[in-house]
Image (cartoon, rainbow, N blue to C red):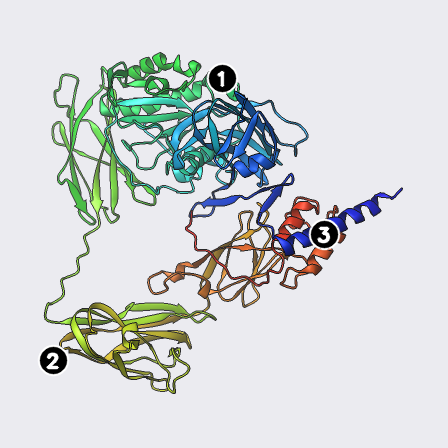
């Protein structure tokens, strides 16, 4: 009997011979292979600007080819339209093979499907120990339709574990056809934790013992780690709120990190369903923490259901009844959660003077309670029986909170202008009355201010207003920033003769409009573009300056003489085949009907001379680039780029007048920082990739593959992968219009798996090494990092057979 080592040796040789044959004859096109079946994952990463938060998604689509080759079909069959009931059957079941999450840690999984008909049931079960044990089968019903690409959207499947796998069971009846099923595995772990958010909120002060109540403390989007930050990819739309609609999120009632769940809900709404942002205006966890949801502030229209104009949507995190079919336990809403719900509604209804017990029309539906559950306005069980049965209590407590029988009333807050420009003083008048509408004198009125800009919210110290017998006047002059100025006004009596009252009013401060005087009709402008160019004394850095004309009539010829300091910069030759160094002319001068009379650069004296004429009907007119000068930095310093002589000749032979605008080129020392992302093919953890610059400095990538290093020529290496390179030529950034001192992003690059012997080519030697280490834990050959050299590693290497490095295929990405 052969021993185990001999058997493994035979198996290794069989695998390697088979894969080499497949590689030569057919090729292998998969990125990941699981359980012998081929799945390709689309990887998407959303990251906050500060790099502290990110959400990663791995998406794959199961179609007819997968259904027919993986899993079990019972009473079902497939064709090019998808999965359907077999002839002679009335129903059937498909059970998938186990599908392993490509992520190291998976927080949640979502399902989207395309369907013809409606008689379908989808069920899933989970394993978080590599498939050794499995949960019960749980239904995943349709939650939203239509969503992205006219698909049906299921509910979030909460995992929050490592080594996760999923199975899907599809039950079809009648003529229903499932065209495809999209699975998305997500990781929202990276970001602020609950304890960090709590510490930040503890440092914020809010008004207490005022009536109507002030706005409760909110964890802003940046605070909970929204990858889109305080902004949004969508333009906010607004409508006054008439109703508060309360939902629950249909997620578990337990968590060690609620902020992580908020990021998952954001990703589910914004990216997977395709809404562009989270659907709730606010979310509240069982600890009572209120999270800012939809970007845009008060009265912004959210997108949780199709007809929600006029609704402030609150998403309570958890399941509060009717969740048994999802496999989650039902819970009573916590007192902390209910207190926060009531505080949030009390602020809104007190400010907008809405009666919590009232009924009003909501999106064409008459007599909808102004505090309603999701089930009151759409076909859903949300917010669950337990929470829905608390709505009466919420209405009563809210009414008590905003009923202020002995309080003052801030009747109005008037500004002296509708809007302001930066630098202008904001003058305001506050009218204070009692319950009988009589002016109140001798009160203490203070105003606090939140300056809300596109990137941040900054609180300013309070200031007092002057009593003018019931009318109180104040002024605020620190208006250097453009944005929304939200004044939070509190009125109290020094002897406590009435309960303090509170109001919020806002105005807008705009930056002064930038106006460019119209050009004089009788003259053109010839200018250096950009006027002030910054570059670095750094290898591979090649900045450029253009000489452009604006507002020109039809020109038949041009003549330009310009000068620069040759000790600071030199001109990079645009045509090595010519005798003299040349600049790059406008393409129109290279056409057959044009003639370049002179194009040369005196590199010793720093003189550029260019002269050309256009023949026939060819002309240059309006705004156009005449020539482009590519610079080669020589030393640190700044040089003027002077237009010593310019002549613009019209087609009728007359010289056209012009204004000349000179410019500069500044060469800075060193290299700018370079940022980027390195993706390891076949892996979900991209940490540990070594990035080296031309000076020998090194950094390693984080778990999401991001790095930052001083610029220059970069070498990127990771064991078992082809090397990569990067430099300033790898980016599409326009150096002439970008602030390069803040750093340059190269985008992302994928390292190709399989170069085990690190000779920068994936060949028979790599395959042979892998065959000899099959079923071991050899770290060089275990290219996908799952702890064993196996068929998955071989598939990757065979797929990349004969690929050579180093690679330089950078893909431009946004910061999200």
Q: Which mark is residue 255?
A: none
Question: Residue at the location (30% across, 27% down)?
Answer: 308
Mark earlier in primary sequence (2, 1)? 1
| Residue denoted by label 2 | 654
Q: Nearer the viewer, residue 510 or 209?
A: 510
Residues under numbered marks 2 and 3 in contact, where contact means CB atoms less than 8 Å apart: no
Residue 743 image position (x, y, % from top left): 43, 59
- As measured in the structure, the alpha-carbon distance from the residue carrying label 2 to the one carrying label 1 is 87 Å
Q: Residue 571: which quarter of the image? A: bottom left
Question: Residue at the location (32% across, 20% down)?
Answer: 377
| Residue denoted by label 1 | 331
- As measured in the structure, the alpha-carbon distance from the residue carrying label 2 to the one carrying label 3 is 78 Å
Mark 2 lies on a secondary structure that is loop
Which mark lies nearer to you, 2 or 1? 2
Whether residue 249 sits left or right of residue 722 in the image: it is left
| Residue denoted by label 3 | 16
Mark earlier in primary sequence (2, 3)? 3
Residues under numbered marks 2 and 1 in contact, where contact means CB atoms less than 8 Å apart: no
Q: Is residue 330 visible?
A: yes
Is residue 399 depicted above or below 810 in this figure?
above
Residue 129 image position (x, y, % from top left): 65, 32
Residue 464 image position (x, y, % from top left): 22, 35
């Amino acid at each position: 009997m052969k021993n185990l080592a001999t058997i493994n040796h035979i198996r290794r040789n069989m695998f390697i011979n088979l894969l080499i044959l497949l590689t030569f004859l057919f090729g292998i096109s998969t990125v990941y292979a699981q359980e012998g079946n081929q799945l390709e994952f689309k990887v998407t990463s959303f990251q906050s600007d500060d790099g502290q938060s990110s959400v990663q998604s791995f998406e794959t689509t199961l179609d007819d080819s997968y259904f027919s080759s993986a899993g079990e079909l019972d009473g079902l069959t497939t064709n090019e339209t998808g999965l359907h009931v077999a002839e002679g059957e009335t129903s059937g079941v498909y059970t998938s093979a186990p599908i392993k999450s490509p992520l190291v840690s998976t927080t949640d999984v979502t399902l989207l499907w395309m369907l013809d008909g409606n008689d379908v049931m989808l069920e899933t079960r989970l394993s978080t120990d590599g498939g050794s044990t499995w949960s019960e089968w749980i239904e995943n019903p349709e939650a939203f339709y239509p969503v992205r690409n006219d698909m049906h959207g299921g509910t979030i499947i909460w995992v929050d574990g490592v080594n996760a796998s999923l199975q899907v069971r599809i039950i079809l009846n009648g003529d229903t056809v499932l065209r495809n099923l999209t699975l998305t595995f997500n990781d929202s772990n990276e970001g602020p934790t609950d304890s960090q958010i709590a510490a930040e909120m503890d440092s914020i002060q809010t008004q207490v013992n005022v009536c109507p109540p002030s706005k409760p403390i909110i964890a802003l989007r940046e605070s909970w780690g929204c990858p889109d930050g305080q902004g949004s990819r969508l333009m906010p739309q607004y409508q006054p709120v008439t109703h508060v609609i309360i939902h629950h999120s249909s997620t578990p009632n337990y968590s060690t990190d609620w902020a992580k769940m908020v990021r998952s809900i954001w990703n589910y709404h914004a990216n997977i369903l395709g809404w562009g942002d989270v659907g709730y205006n606010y979310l509240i966890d069982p600890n009572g923490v209120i999270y800012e949801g939809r970007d845009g502030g008060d009265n912004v229209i959210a997108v949780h259901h199709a007809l929600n104009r006029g609704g402030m949507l609150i998403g309570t995190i958890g399941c509060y009844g009717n969740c048994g079919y999802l496999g989650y336990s039902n819970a009573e809403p916590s007192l902390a959660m209910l207190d926060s719900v009531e505080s949030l509604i009390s602020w809104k209804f007190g400010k907008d003077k809405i009666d919590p017990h009232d009924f009003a029309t909501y999106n064409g539906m008459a007599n909808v309670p102004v505090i309603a559950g999701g089930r009151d306005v759409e076909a859903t069980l949300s917010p669950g029986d337990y929470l829905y049965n608390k709505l009466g209590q919420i209405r009563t407590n809210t009414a008590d909170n905003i009923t202020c029988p002995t309080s003052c009333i801030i009747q109005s807050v008037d500004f002296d202008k509708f809007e302001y420009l930066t630098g202008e003083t904001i003058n305001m008048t506050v009218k204070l009355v009692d319950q009988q509408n009589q002016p109140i004198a001798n009160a203490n009125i203070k105003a606090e201010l939140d300056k809300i800009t596109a990137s941040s919210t900054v609180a300013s110290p309070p200031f007092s207003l002057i009593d003018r017998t019931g009318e109180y006047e104040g002024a605020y002059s620190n208006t250097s920033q453009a944005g929304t100025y939200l004044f939070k006004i509190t009125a109290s009596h020094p002897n406590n003769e009435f309960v303090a009252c509170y109001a919020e009013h806002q105005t807008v401060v705009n930056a002064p409009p930038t106006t460019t005087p119209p050009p004089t009709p009788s003259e053109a402008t010839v200018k250096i573009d950009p006027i002030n160019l910054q570059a670095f004394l750094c290898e591979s850095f090649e900045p450029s300056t253009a000489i452009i004309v604006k507002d020109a009539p039809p020109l038949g010829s041009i003549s330009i003489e310009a000068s620069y300091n040759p000790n600071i910069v030199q001109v990079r030759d645009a045509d090595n085949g010519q005798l003299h160094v040349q600049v790059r002319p406008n393409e129109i001068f290279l056409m057959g009907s044009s003639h370049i009379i002179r194009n040369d650069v005196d590199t010793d004296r720093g003189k550029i001379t260019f002269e050309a004429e256009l023949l026939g009907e060819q002309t240059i007119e309006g705004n156009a680039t005449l020539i482009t000068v590519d610079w080669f930095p020589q030393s640190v310093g700044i040089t003027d780029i002077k237009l010593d002589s310019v002549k613009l000749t019209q087609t009728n032979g007359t010289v056209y007048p012009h204004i000349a605008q000179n410019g500069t080129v500044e060469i800075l020392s060193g290299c700018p920082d370079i940022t980027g992302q390195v993706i390891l093919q076949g892996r979900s953890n991209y940490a540990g990739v070594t990035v080296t610059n031309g000076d020998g400095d090194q950094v390693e990538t984080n778990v999401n593959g991001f790095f930052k290093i001083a610029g220059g020529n970069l070498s990127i290496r990771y064991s078992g992968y082809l090397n990569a390179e990067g430099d300033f030529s790898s980016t599409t950034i326009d150096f002439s219009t970008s602030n390069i001192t803040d750093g340059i992003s190269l985008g992302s690059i994928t390292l190709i798996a399989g170069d085990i012997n690190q000779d920068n080519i994936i060949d028979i030697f790599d395959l042979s090494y892998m065959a000899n280490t099959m079923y071991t834990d050899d770290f060089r050959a275990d290219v996908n990092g799952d702890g064993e050299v196996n068929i998955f590693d071989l598939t990757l290497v065979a797929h990349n057979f004969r690929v050579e490095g180093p690679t330089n295929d950078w893909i431009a990405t946004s910061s999200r």
